[in-house]
Image: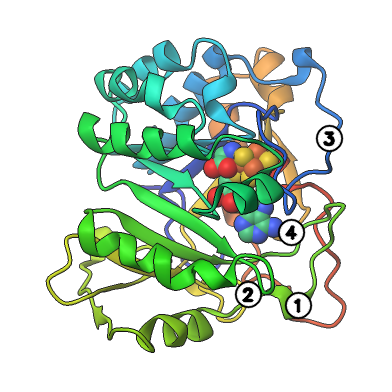
Amino acid sequence: MPKLVDAYARKIDYLRISVTDRCNLRCVYCMPPQGIDLAESKNILRYEEILRTARIACANGVTKIRITGGEPLVRRGIVDFLKSLSATPGLVDLSLTTNGVLLKEYAAALKSAGLRRVNVSLDSLNAERFKKITRGDNLTQVQGGIEEAQRAGLTPVKINMVAIKGFNDGEIVEFAMLSKTKPYHVRFIEYMPFDTTEGWQRDKCISAKELKAMIETVEPLEPVLTTAGNAGPAKRFRFKDAPGEVGFISPVSEHFCGSCNRLRLTADGKLRLCLFSDTEIDLRAPLRDGSSDEAVANVILRAAFEKPEKHLINENFFKKCSRTMSLIGG
Ligand code: SAM
Ligand code: SF4
């Protein structure tokens, strides 16, 4: 019987776990060029602590876990960790979000370890623009990683593109068209307000509605019917007879808080109740002070119960989150 339910009767069955705050890229919307102040390594949860948290969360209703970061593939021992994690009783769906730089070499091992699927973040198909956005020169590696993930069966491979006005908006149609020749799920994500050096401005955010209209100037999209089991925050479409899909995730223009089913665990052991709220509940102390599984479960249950009803990013008084996405585990 699932127990993780919040005060608004939302069932919480999805845990996003950041395994590191480190990253091998420096995307302009996520980090300053010099990187961020990293947590001391003693404050980063050990794999055993994450596995225990996952076991307790799954015993209380979590069925889906996504591993993220920073860049999860830079943490040593990630494959063995995923192998142990995938054996967690009650866990049905294990996925990972990556920038794709190391994916080519890891894809087959990740699949063997029990990972089901990957989301690869890619914001430009143009080498120069890719460099500008990520401050890295790795486009070919990322593209190779996507192909290898598809070959390894980490499917559907989702390609997440953050669309930013005046930056990569000229590539939106080209990205969507990837779904016509490959079975990729290309997902456009609205640019979100986090406190980074480049700074977020509302007018740089392109709404899902505008994105869809831009694509449909070239070719119409038809809706993909979802069942309760595969419904997520993305609004899903496809071009007629295309092997892949096109999706839109609109946290800014049209929030989906009413159906939010997730909690986040940061790499330094805080339960984050909402992506856009700085309210966090510490799990690292109970994991380390000899607390029983029941006591740890109670902290997770309290975190779920205290989830805010909705985010406030469209309110005038909204303050940008103090942690960057790389620290929260986007
Ligand atoms: N390093 C991995 C990656 O890039 O996929 C995983 C962590 S990264 C923080 C997770 C996702 O957050 C990426 O898809 C990235 O594009 C997204 N992200 C980071 N900052 C963002 C922002 N300000 N707005 C929208 N998405 C953002
Ligand atoms: Fe690294 Fe991902 Fe942030 Fe880019 S978005 S800097 S790849 S954590």
Specify the amino acid type for callout 1.
Arg
* Above-or-below relation of 322 to 180: above
**Which sits in the foreground, 283 or 220?**
220
First reached walking from the N terminus: tag 4 or tag 2: 2
Residue at image mark 1: 202
First reached walking from the N terminus: tag 4 or tag 3: 3
Sort mark 1 into few (<14), some (14-19) or many (20+) by Cα contacts within 10 Å: few
Q: Nearer the viewer, mark 2 or mark 1?
A: 1
Q: Is residue 306 visible?
A: no
Sort mark 3 into few (<14), some (14-19) or many (20+) by Cα contacts within 10 Å: some
Instruction: Give residue 248's position: percent from left, percent from top.
Output: 44, 71
Residue 171 placement, left or right of 46: left
Residue at image mark 2: 252
| Mark 1: secondary structure | helix
Residue at image mark 4: 277
Sort mark 4 into few (<14), some (14-19) or many (20+) by Cα contacts within 10 Å: many
Specify the amino acid type for callout 4.
Ser
Seen at 36% across and 51% down, the residue is 158
Q: Nearer the viewer, mark 3 or mark 2?
A: 3
Residue at image mark 3: 36
Is there a contact, CB below 8 Å, between mark 2 and mark 1?
yes
* Above-or-below relation of 75 to 67: above
Specify the amino acid type for callout 3.
Ile
